[in-house]
Image (cartoon, helix red, strand yellow):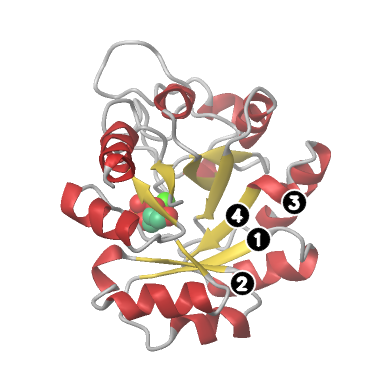
Amino acid sequence: MTQIFAHRGYSAAFPENTMSAFIEAQKAGADGIELDVQLTKDGEVVVIHDEKVDRTTSGSGFVKEFTYKEIRTLNANKKGGKNEPIPSIIEVFEWMKSNDLICNIELKNGVFLYEGMEEKCIQLIHQYGLSNRIIFSSFNHYSIVHCYQLDPVIETAPLYSEGLYMPWVYAKAICSKGIHPDYRTLLVDEMIINSINSGIAVRPYTVNKEADMKRLFQLNCSAFITDDPPVALKIKKQIEKRP
Ligand code: G3P
Ligand code: CA
């Protein structure tokens, strides 16, 4: 059955990439979370989407120019209300001890390469025994191949936003077990069906429209990434009820 991954956590209702958004995604019944990581000046892996802190936090400047201690003083709940620090990946892994969610780590190293970020993530994944619950994705495909070379057990999946022809062939060429396409590139059902039949999981992003969710459930797509897990759960239940 199609899994539901919460995009930046339950970001439709909670501040993106915060512990609240992850905890609420789990409470809502998501199968997994998707989050974005960058590296601080002193080499800590932190969970934030942009290279700069400006859009989502009370601060300004590049993530890579803050130490971990400094970045923790910012509030990632910019809209107001409860203070929400930028999580470290360690905090997420600690929380994952209390559940069985899958964590899709998107390595945000397309602008800055953040040398050593893959190694740091993998060292922590090993420390927490999470190799089978992590999927690395990135628009930087060199980075996910590097992850595969460091540890072939941890799954990787390329992110892409163009209509690739036979993407499952490409996925296999870079030793990935899945693909994470922009939903809008999935023009024909065969792209999903053939990929899954070739052993390559398909987890499109970012699927928020009910009709799109319905299509993916009906095709038994591997998973999809959504801002709104409760809506996805509602559609899933409706489909399951049908004879
Ligand atoms: O992982 C899929 C999706 O999150 C990629 O786009 O910009 O939301 O990180 P973005
Ligand atoms: Ca992302």
- Sooner in the amino-acid sequence: mark 1 or mark 3: 3
Query: Crowding near pointer 2: few (<14 within 10 Å), some, many (20+)?
Result: many
Cβ–Cβ below 8 Å for labels 4 and 3?
no
Badge 4 is on which residue? 135
Cβ–Cβ below 8 Å for labels 4 and 1?
yes
Quarter of the rendering containing residue 11: top left
Q: Which x, y percent locates residue 35?
A: 48, 43
Mark 3 residue element: helix
Identify which amino acid the numbered label 1 is placed on: Glu
Task: Give the label on residue 176, or none.
Answer: 2
- Sooner in the amino-acid sequence: mark 1 or mark 2: 1
The answer to whether 180 appears left or right of 115 in the picture is left
Look at the picture and state if 30 lies above or below 177.
Answer: above
Task: Give the label on residue 122, or none.
Answer: 3
Mark 2 residue element: loop
Query: Crowding near pointer 3: few (<14 within 10 Å), some, many (20+)?
Result: many
Identify which amino acid the numbered label 4 is placed on: Ile
Q: Nearer the viewer, mark 1 or mark 3?
A: 1
Q: Nearer the viewer, mark 2 or mark 3?
A: 2
Look at the picture and state if 211 lies above or below 87.
Answer: below
Residue under the point 66% across and 76% down: 175
Cβ–Cβ below 8 Å for labels 1 and 3?
no
Badge 1 is on which residue? 155
**3D distance between C-alphas at marks 4 and 1:** 5 Å
39 or 17: nearer the eye? 17
208 or 110: nearer the eye? 208
Q: Nearer the viewer, mark 4 or mark 3?
A: 4
**3D distance between C-alphas at marks 2 and 4:** 10 Å
**3D distance between C-alphas at marks 1 and 3:** 11 Å
